[in-house]
Amino acid sequence: MNNKKIYICPSILSADFRKLEQEVKDVEQAGADRIHCDVMDGHFVPNLTFGPMVIEAVKKCVSIPLDVHLMISNPEKYIDNYCNAGADILTVHAEVCKEGLPEVLAAIESKGVKRGVTVNPDKGIDLFLPLLEQIDQVLIMTVYAGFGGQKFISEMLPKIRSVRDTALEREHPIDIQVDGGINDETARECAAEGANVFVAGNYIFGADNYGRKIDALRQGASTGNAR
Ligand code: DX5
Ligand code: ZN
């Protein structure tokens, strides 16, 4: 039984950027808990999105926390920029930080920002598990970083459970986030393994009624959570 609070995080990657202010205000109004911001550099991933200026602008539009997912090379160079822009949670990829990961985590913490770590689906959680006590949120990628609208990779489900079990063993409270191909059904499957933070791009922004989708996601996650 998993009693952790559930957080729903719409990913603005799928928002209509012509009216980004309205989009983020609408999902906040519709019950979102955090705004997920996907930063891509065209180098670590083959897609390019936005940088700190957009984060700073979004920060001014909403009062819920900003959850910033950095899909960039050399993240250590930009930690201050993203923290200063308004990130409340900053997630880095362990496979890019390599042996520099402890310093990156310390830099994030020194800015008073929550520390998030992830890896792509083909990389192991062993890249960050030894540092679990220095991490506030683990993100299990359920698609390859780079694009919205991809199909959920169900082979990632055991990773969620391994992180959950290790955190329980070490008595370290941690949020477990999932990102990629999340809908009410996949959210339920992830919650059953121990996930409590749900990112969704297309599922929410692709719909006419954001509130209905956020509620359905929360409902799916709660069903899995109660298992
Ligand atoms: C993928 C991003 C995701 C993306 C998810 O690289 O990290 O946050 O926006 O989009 P959906 O929910 O459409 O799979
Ligand atoms: Zn993301």
Image: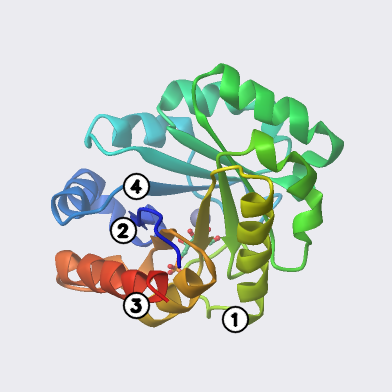
Dot placed on the residue nearer the N-terminal end, 4 or 2: 2
How far apart in space, not on screen, are marks 4 and 3 (Cα)? 18 Å
| Residue at point 36%, 29% (across, down) | 56
Q: Assign the N terminus to one quadrant of the image.
A: bottom left
Dots 1 and 3: beta carbons under 8 Å? no
Give the SS element for disc 2.
loop
**Residue 184 — which label?**
3
Q: Amino acid at mark 3?
A: Asp
Q: Amino acid at mark 4?
A: Ile
Residue 206 visible, this orientation: no
Dots 3 and 2: beta carbons under 8 Å? no
Q: Quarter-wise, where is residue 218 in the image? A: bottom left
- Label 4 within 8 A of ligand 1 by Cβ: no
Dot placed on the residue nearer the N-terminal end, 1 or 2: 2
**Residue 154 — which label?**
1
- Per the image, the residue denoted by label 4 is 35
How far apart in space, not on screen, are marks 3 and 2 (Cα)? 19 Å
Dot placed on the residue nearer the N-terminal end, 1 or 4: 4
Q: Amino acid at mark 1?
A: Ser
Q: Is residue 203 above or below residue 2?
A: below
Residue 194 in the image: x percent, y percent?
52, 65
